[in-house]
Image (spheres, rainbow, N blue to C red):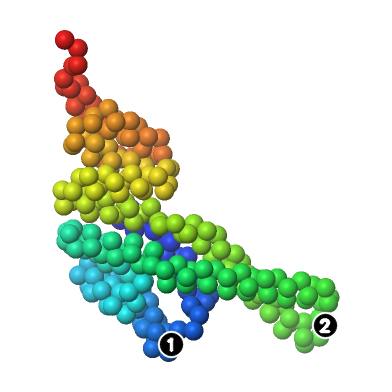
Amino acid sequence: MRIIALLAGFLVAAQGVAAQSEPPSPSPADRAARVQARERLREGQRRMASDAFVEAAKEFEAAVALDPLLFMGHYGLGTALMGLKEYAAAISAFEGARTAFHDPVSVGNRIETDKARQRRIHHLRQLIANTAASGPATGTGARQESAQGNARHAELQDLLRANQESERVRDLPPGLSLALGSAYFRTGHLADAEREYRAAIAAQPALGEPRSNLAVVLLITGRKAEAKEQLELAKKTGFTPPRGLEDDIGKALVHAPSNTP
């Protein structure tokens, strides 16, 4: 479940941003479909929490049918299919997540959402500043003003946290490349797996798991010294490699043919 955890931050941001603003002028039917899609998404995530992969996959499939640009719906479907060991179908789902993320409409929606959040932050800060400048209320109005002030401060903090999360997800989350790499590895497509693991490392060098997985691919394809290098880098991040991998790489290096006559 490490791959799911890697995208947890993205999920928080995506759901938090969606709650703050909808894309400009969607039709009533589109709005209804998006609401239903997120309900099915949440149900799929609940099913995933109990490893009910079949039921989760059905919920995620329904979510992306309702909203084809729902990144987390595609990603959730991919993780459920990985749990079912349907690796080729998982590749398709993960690629769907990548397509949804880069779709011009999705990009535009994220930009509009960011703008709407910035406008709301500016408005709240003005309200808070104006209230402070006018001095404290007295009598029965004091309690109401205090409650409003607390609500505004709480909303502002939520929006600022959403801002921070949004900054982290401007680029495709490295967890998707890691998931795709694992799916490709399971289907024997080692070159594709290597490409995705390297993409995950390039996006977030501090991740140890893609380096460890890359070390496995390198070992299998005969690049033993590079496999050892990636494994050492993975360990430096604090990641614990699979049991036996370090020994396997060490044995391969010992039995590697010498280049000297």
**Is 19 situated above or below 188?**
below
- Residue at left offset 33%, top offset 30%: 229
Dot 1 or dot 2, earlier in sequence: 1
Instruction: Residue under label 1, please give it.
Output: 27
Judged from this view, the residue extending furthest toward the front is: 104
Q: For mark 1, does the 10 Å Cα neighbourhood hold few (<14), some (14 to 19), or many (20 or more) residues?
A: few
**Is 227 situated above or below 91?**
above
- Residue at left offset 42%, top offset 65%: 11
Instruction: Residue under label 2, please give it.
Output: 138
Q: Nearer the viewer, residue 33 or 51?
A: 33
Q: Quadrant of residue 32?
A: bottom left
Q: Quadrant of residue 244?
A: top left
* Cβ atoms under marks 1 and 2 closer than 8 Å: no
Element on which disc 2 rests: loop
**Is 15 situated above or below 33?**
above
Whole-number angstrom distance, CA of label 1 to CA of label 2? 46 Å
Left or right of 219: which side holds 103?
A: right
Element on which disc 1 rests: loop
Across and down, in percent, residue 240 comes to 33, 40
Judged from this view, the residue extending furthest toward the bottom is: 28
Q: Amino acid at mark 2?
A: Thr
Across and down, in percent, residue 242 comes to 26, 40
